[in-house]
Image: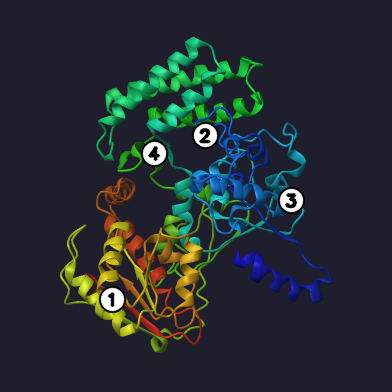
Amino acid sequence: RQLVERDLPRTVDALHPLLRRRPEFAMLKGRSNYLCLHRLHEGVPQDEEEGLFDQFEAAAPTSKLGQDLLRMRDWADETETGDRDDLTPGVSDRAWSQVSVSSRECLGASKCAYGAECFAETARERAKLSEVVVTNHALLAIDAIEGAPVLPQHEVLIVDEAHELVSRVTGVATGELTPGQVNRAVRRAAKLVNEKAGDQLQTAAEGFERLMELALPGRLEEIPEDLGYALMALRDACRTVISAIGTTRDKSVQDEDAVRKQALASVESVHDVAERITNGSEWDVVWYERHDRFGASLRVAPMSVSGLLREKLFTDRSVVLTSATLKLGGDFNGVGASLGLAPEGTEGDDVPQWKGVDVGSPFDYRKQGILYVAKHLARPARDGDRGDMLDELTELIQAAGGRTLGLFSSMRAAQLAAEELRSRIPEYPILLQGEETLGELIKNFAADPRTCLFGTLSLWQGVDVPGPSCQLVVMDKIPFPRPDDPLMSARQKAVEEAGGNGFMAVAATHAALLMAQGAGRLVRASGDRGVVAVLDQRLATA
């Protein structure tokens, strides 16, 4: 948003005298980021939330979800963009899902009664007419992965925060199956297919759910026979249902086009992931996850996205990758390798040529910052009791007079620290990620220098608070990936099997990038001063 609201307007002003015109620019995001007027006015068709709006028509809702839904109705009459990020204060993912659709669920402007007013279509048309289009990594990844182009045709691509590109593309390329997702597909398809097709999908869903109840977290080096059969049954049942939905019409179903689109989207999503896993690509990593709240899930992700990036992003356009943390160990080759680029200067017909340029920094870190490593603390153990770390953190916050950004390796560690320190030093308010929206937390943190802010990954990279409110950045430990992280451990093993150092190429690079980003939260302006404190003795001997 900074690009659209601050940087690009300044650039346009500077270019105006030279070009004798003002270049047009626009922002474009994925469809689910925009409010859908059809979903807003017609409701969620044939789903568990069916009639949610109607029940609040006669009386004011008392639930938070109901209040958010009615607030979004009012906002829809005021907003010019329909962009979720323009809704203040924000709403939960569950609430937003009631007023948004994925690209698969969308009816299409020509078939939708609200097509002429559609916020997503308006944004797409504006982007087509603009010379500069600002988007996010997720939509860029979708554009690279999907067969049909999503972004307007372009000759130059500039990727900011390029150190995150691999992670974002991996996220988009990751598939997931959960019992809830499969059962949702069964419900949505039920009224659109014959009894035989519906029963086939129901039976396959029940078989998959029974297996998931017994699933243990971890990577599946090979797909167990029972899981393979369950996934093939699910895949085949989805194929039958998809075919049946395409040939069946039921005039008794209200708003049938929307119901049909939503059902197809759900069933196709299940089919695609089940088929991908049963195909058993050697380049995919498959694993079980289990969450206390959401239960078990089966996930599949690419071992590497370097080939995808090289083929889809770097071959037919000029690309500029920018970030403060692209250079590790004195050169760009480490990050370049993760992006699918051969070492700088490598010759070859199929090798994209690139050049790394270090433009330096406007800040004098030797004068503006101090690195403090707590060598006397015990070596951190995973999820272990770190009473000595909390003692150290308490003293540091008191010495700084608050003004502390606490970057933790897990949400559990952040929660425990916040709970303990709120009782130890109540004179210093402690904000915790998840208790408010990120924007509100950062706003409140910046407003009161005595305040501290604790959190995890999004704070390591997403906080920009220049001035006196952030003079101490604390990292509880070096952010290596968890040893049982299926994807990271698979990537590390692949490097080792190829003769490389898996730990250095994967785990150490991951940690170094995160630490550089975290340390970068301290000095945000030329007048900033402060301390980066790492409460992990291993940094002193690394």
Q: Are marks 1 and 3 in contact (CB under 8 Å)?
A: no
Coordinates of residue 519 in the picture (x, y in percent): 39, 73
Tag 3 near tag 4, CB within 8 Å: no
Q: Which of the 4 quarters of the picture holds residue 384?
A: bottom left
Residue at far right of view = 20
Spatial CA distance of label 1 from label 4 is 44 Å
Q: Quadrant of residue 43?
A: top right
Q: How far is the residue under mark 3 from the one under mark 4?
A: 34 Å
Q: How is the image coloured?
A: rainbow
Q: Quadrant of the C terminus?
A: bottom left
Q: Specify which label sits upstream in the sequence, 1 or 4.
A: 4
| Front tag of 2 and 4 | 2
Q: Can residue 494 be spotted in the picture? A: yes
Q: Which residue is mark 2?
A: 49
Q: Residues within 10 Å of mark 4 (few under 14, many from 20)?
A: many
Label count reads 4
Mark 3–mark 2 Cα distance, whole angstroms, equals: 35 Å
Residue wearing tag 4: 300
Q: Work out whether 154 lies above or below 473.
A: above
Cα separation, mark 1 vs mark 2, equals: 44 Å
- Left or right: 534 as drawn, with respect to 362: left
Residue placed at 43% from the left, 80% from the top? 449
| Residue 246, x across and y down, in percent | 61, 19
Q: Viewer-proximal residue, 448 or 64?
A: 64
Q: Position of residue 31 (x, y in %)?
A: 62, 44
Q: Secondary structure at mark 2?
A: loop
* Label whose residue precedes the other's in the sequence (1 or 3): 3
Q: State the SS at label 1.
A: loop
Q: Secondary structure at mark 4?
A: strand
In this figure, which residue is indicated by the disc labeled 1?
425
Residue drawn 77% across the image and 65% down it? 23
